[in-house]
Amino acid sequence: MNIPQKPVRWQGSDAALHAVQVAFDVEATVLEAVRRAAFDNNLSSSDQIRRILGLLVSHRPKRPRLTVTLTPDDYRTLGERYDLPPNERLAIKERVTQELIDFAQHKLR
C-alpha cells in the first residue's frame, strides 16, 4: 500500500502534534505575577512561563489580538446595542472592535 507523503508545508508541524498543553492550578498571586510579567515583557502567558522555566521561546511575531467567546444570546444583545441583526456577526465584530479602540483611547488619556 502506498501512503501519500505529507505536503512540505505540513512537515514542520510534526513536533507540535506531540506537544501537550499543561494547566497549572496556582494561587491568584502566582497567576497575577505571571500575567503581569508577560504583559511587561510583551509576551503571552505561555511564553512567559516558558521563559521562567528556561525553555525556548518562539521569536516569531504574534498577531496582537484579544479574544472573547460570544454566545448566540450575546450576539442578540450586541445586535440590539448596535441596532444590527444578530446574524450580522462581521458587522457586530467591527462595532465591538471600534468600541474596544474607543475604550483604549479613553483609558490612555
Image (cartoon, rainbow, N blue to C red):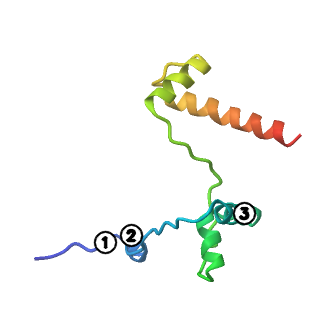
- Badge 2: few (under 14), some or many (20 or more) residues near its Cα, within 10 Å? few
Furthest-right residue in this view: 109
Q: Secondary structure at mark 2?
A: helix
Q: How many marks?
A: 3
Residue 69 percent coordinates (x, y): 50, 41
For the residues labelled 3 and 2, the Cα–Cα distance comes to 29 Å
* The label number, if any, that marks residue 6 in the structure image: 1
For the residues labelled 2 and 1, the Cα–Cα distance comes to 6 Å
* Figure quadrant of the C terminus: top right
Q: Which one is closest to the eye, mark 1 or mark 3?
A: 3
The image quarter in which residue 40 lies: bottom right
Q: Secondary structure at mark 1?
A: loop
Residue type at the position of mark 3: Asn
Residue 54 percent coordinates (x, y): 63, 83
- Badge 3: few (under 14), some or many (20 or more) residues near its Cα, within 10 Å? few
Identify which residue is drawn at 65% across, 36% down.
Answer: 97
Q: Which one is closest to the eye, mark 3 or mark 2?
A: 3
Q: Identify residue for label 2.
A: 10
Q: Identify residue for label 3.
A: 42
Furthest-front residue in this view: 27
- Badge 1: few (under 14), some or many (20 or more) residues near its Cα, within 10 Å? few
Residue type at the position of mark 1: Lys
Q: Position of 42 compared to 49: left or right?
A: right
Q: Position of 59 compared to 90: left or right?
A: right
- The tag earlier along the polypeptide, 1 or 3, is 1
The image quarter in which residue 27 lies: bottom right
Residue 42 percent coordinates (x, y): 72, 63
Tag 2 and tag 1, C-beta contact below 8 Å = yes
- The tag earlier along the polypeptide, 3 or 2, is 2
Residue type at the position of mark 2: Trp
Residue 90 percent coordinates (x, y): 53, 32
